[in-house]
Amino acid sequence: MATFAETKALTFDVFGTILDLSGSLTPFISESLDAHAATDVSADEFWGQWRYRQRIEQYQDTIMMLGHSGYLETVRRALHYTLRRHSIDTLPDTVKAFMHGWEHLSPFPEVLAALSRLKSRYRLAVLSNGDPSFLDYLVRERIGWDFDDVISVTSVGAFKPHPAVYRAAARDLGLEVNECMMVSANSFDIVGARACGYRGAFVNRYLLPYEETSYQPDVTVCDFTALADALL
């Protein structure tokens, strides 16, 4: 059984790990699709395409090194692509309606109770691709948890899993990389963190396979309740 005696801080991904993106956004997407009489795609399918395209936008942003666009800008660009894919106009009001749900993201139901357990042993920090002001809003208004630190990749100018993100976060926390554990439902995030020397906790909420790589998670769980059970 793995032990984590050297681990001093848990750094948490937000989007899809703490916050339930699909559960929060699909009702808003459904309303917007109905308003445009879009019958060729369900809200779940549209969200899957939107999310996938956003990942591409983020990777392109970092790889081309043309300047860090920011999280919500990659969300907007991915939305434009997905709307055009389904022949829906991209007028400002249309984009605004689809983007509205991002102001109403909610955490998975077990998150806060698990954080309360974990804080007794670890420093708890956000390490997110989100923009600083958006993260501040989400942590304060939607998650409602007083993290020890909220770290945005904006300070580095690249999206996860760029190695500078994880190294800078450890520095900001005043820790060595091996004293930090990345907690994420996105396997690429765990791969990136492990490659930098972090420990990794893969919260496999979506029952997806993990990458074929030597940078495997130290622990794999299905939710935050199981995470607290494994780490305490």
Image: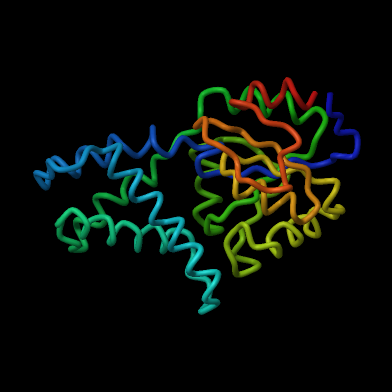
Q: Residue furthest left?
A: 37
Which residue lies at the image location 31% right of the left edge and 48% below the top edge? 100
Which residue lies at the image location 25% right of the left edge and 57% below the top edge? 95
| Horizontal side of residue 188 vs 80, given as left or right | right
Q: Establish if 213 lies above or below 91.
A: above
Q: Position of residue 162 (x, y in %)?
A: 64, 62
Which residue lies at the image location 40% right of the left edge and 49% below the top edge? 51
| Horizontal side of residue 137 vs 157, given as left or right | left
* Image quadrant where residue 144 sits: top right
Q: Position of residue 17 (x, y in %)?
A: 55, 38
Give the position of the C terminus as an image quadrant.
top right
Q: Establish if 1 lies above or below 218.
A: above
Q: Residue furthest bottom?
A: 66
Q: Position of residue 179 (x, y in %)?
A: 85, 46
Of 45 and 107, nearer the camera is: 45
What is the basis of the colouring in this image? rainbow
Q: Residue furthest front?
A: 212
Give the position of the N terminus as an image quadrant.
top right
Q: Residue furthest right?
A: 5
